[in-house]
Amino acid sequence: MNTIVKQIEKAQPFFKKLSANIYLQAVRDGFISLMPIIIFSSLFILVSAVPNIWGFYWPTNVNDGLMKIYNYSMGVLSLMAAANVARALTKSLNLRLPKINQIPTASVMFAAQIAFLLVAVDPFTNKLGLFFTEGYMGTKGLLAAFLVGFIVPNLYYVCFKNHITIKMPDQVPQNISSAFANIIPFALSTSFFGLFDVFFRMATGTNLAAWIIQVLAPLFTAADGYVGLAIVYGAMAFFWFIGIQGPSIVEPAVTAIYLTNVEANMKVFQAGGHATSILAQGTQYFVATLGGTGATLVITYMFALWAKSKELKAVGRAAAIPVTFGVNEPILFGAPLILNPIFFIPFIGAPILNVWLFKIFVDHFGMNGFIYNLPWTTPGPIGLFMGVGFSIQALILVVALLVMDTAVYYPFFKAYDMQKVAEEAEKDKAVAENPDSDANVATDAVVATAAGDIPLGLTKDKKELNILVICAGGGTSGILANALNKMAKEKDLPVEAAAAAYGAHSDLLPDMDVTVLAPQMDAMKDSLKQEADHSDVKMITTTGKQYIDLTRHADKALEFIVNKLQDNDDEGEAK
């Protein structure tokens, strides 16, 4: 097993490069900003449809009002996705341009929305005037939206890089001059998609969004099968195991299928049918990654309750609450599970077996697939029960999943627990034989410094040290930021910390003095370094156990940040 893991590690640089691809980042970042819309609109579906399970139906006008809010949010999701993906990609492309020649994100977003309407919406007229169909403005048009979101920023980039813009005299005010600079790239983008749409409809007889769905229908079907499910969720676990945030690579490829399937399931359910589509965000959050990628809910509680090793018991107890809510970095890096040969098989196998069992319940026991989108931090068993429509089969499945995951992880848990107990015994023996030595010194210890010694001279406003912590989903970064803020308040320190999921960090970053990256951000550190340098923000990276230790000890975290900040300043002066 060690040999296999070492071979896998050799491929890590390639996968890190793949994870940092700006187009995958654009899809991921664009969708992170859309999550409030998805969750908000799903609440109205819940209110509208859940009472039907128990035989209660809202009056028509009430139900129409609830569905109106849903249709005016999720119903135009692709239109907003085109703009948001274009915005995210534009920010990456701007890092390649001089600060005095930046692509305006607002103009790109407007152009992307118009371009999407041109290629995904069918117009029609009647006596009242011109109208257009909305069938592909929702989840069905997402793939077309991504394509538009990729092309429009690149057209702008070509224009701005080669100065193909209208340049006004220096006497013209900057806001007016900027507006004229946008005219050529805006006209090029919208004209390109306008002409493309004309010829494309002549060749295919349909719009781009509909054509993409037709062509990829077999792929959608295959992805919902046992092999496809194993590839999707096995890949997520595999990438995480080698230290790369798995969903960052896999999710952009399946997000459109996720949302399309949930909406299709909902319509079938409302019509009284059996919703059978498997691939969905809920399947990822509450089945395949029950407790986080690797299906780590049970192994965390096994550590906390059954481990004889003091270290594993402490790690399990500290990680239990975060993992219950889907934040599993404390167990991934604390145990560790990732790049640990002992857990290679269960870490990748448990998610695949979970989703296969879920499919069996849907296909053979009458349980619906996911018909609602819920926040990823919903505890897994609760999210599964709610997401599929509060069915008895779901309760049985929850128990079956927990039992199966326990059986899968148990032999590997016992082997690792015995190994750690032996290591602890050796350490205790060494301490007993040489009392003057300290066998418990942390290898990642930070240089001690006074917690109150905040280098305000290195901050932007000279008044307060502003810290941004970035992780994959906003979970552990929130834990660390909250701990820092709590300590700063108790000790009256001029420190303020914020947390962000990667992709939702861009608006916060320019106002910060320093950003701390969780270890799962290692694959994105080069692009984040570009962003940080662009905004004159110092960037600090962390290792696995070091980062988890910092989330538990705010004083040590502040010492670490202050020392790193001062070291960076000393290096700058030396240069």
Image (tube, rainbow, N blue to C red):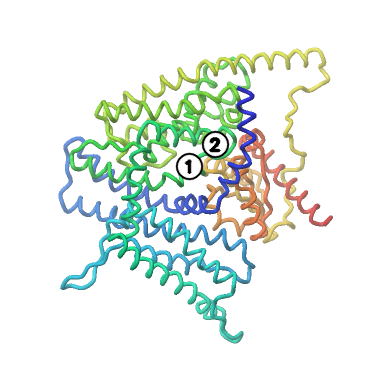
Q: Position of residue 337 (x, y in %)?
A: 58, 28
The residue at which mark 1 appears reads as: 250
- The residue that appears at 61% across and 61% down in the rendered structure is 95
Q: Provide the secondary structure element on which disc 1 rests.
A: helix
Residue 196, compared with residue 542, is above or below; it is below
| Label 2 close to label 1 by CB (< 8 Å) | yes
Q: Provide the secondary structure element on which disc 2 rests.
A: helix
In this orientation, which residue lies closer to the viewer: 379 or 521? 521
Q: Is residue 242 left or right of residue 408?
A: right
Instruction: Place residue 204 in its image quadrant.
Output: bottom left
Q: Position of residue 238 (x, y in %)?
A: 53, 33
Q: Tag 2: Cα neighbours inside 10 Å, few (<14), some, or many (≥20)?
A: many
In this orientation, which residue lies closer to the viewer: 406 or 564? 406
Residue type at numbered disc 2: Phe
In this orientation, which residue lies closer to the viewer: 380 or 200? 200
Q: Position of residue 237 (x, y in %)?
A: 51, 33
Cα separation between marks 2 and 1: 9 Å
Q: Tag 1: Cα neighbours inside 10 Å, few (<14), some, or many (≥20)?
A: some
Q: Position of residue 544 (x, y in %)?
A: 64, 35
- The residue that appears at 55% across and 66% down in the rendered structure is 157
Extreme-front residue of the structure: 203
The residue at which mark 2 appears reads as: 239
For the C terminus, give its image quadrant: bottom right
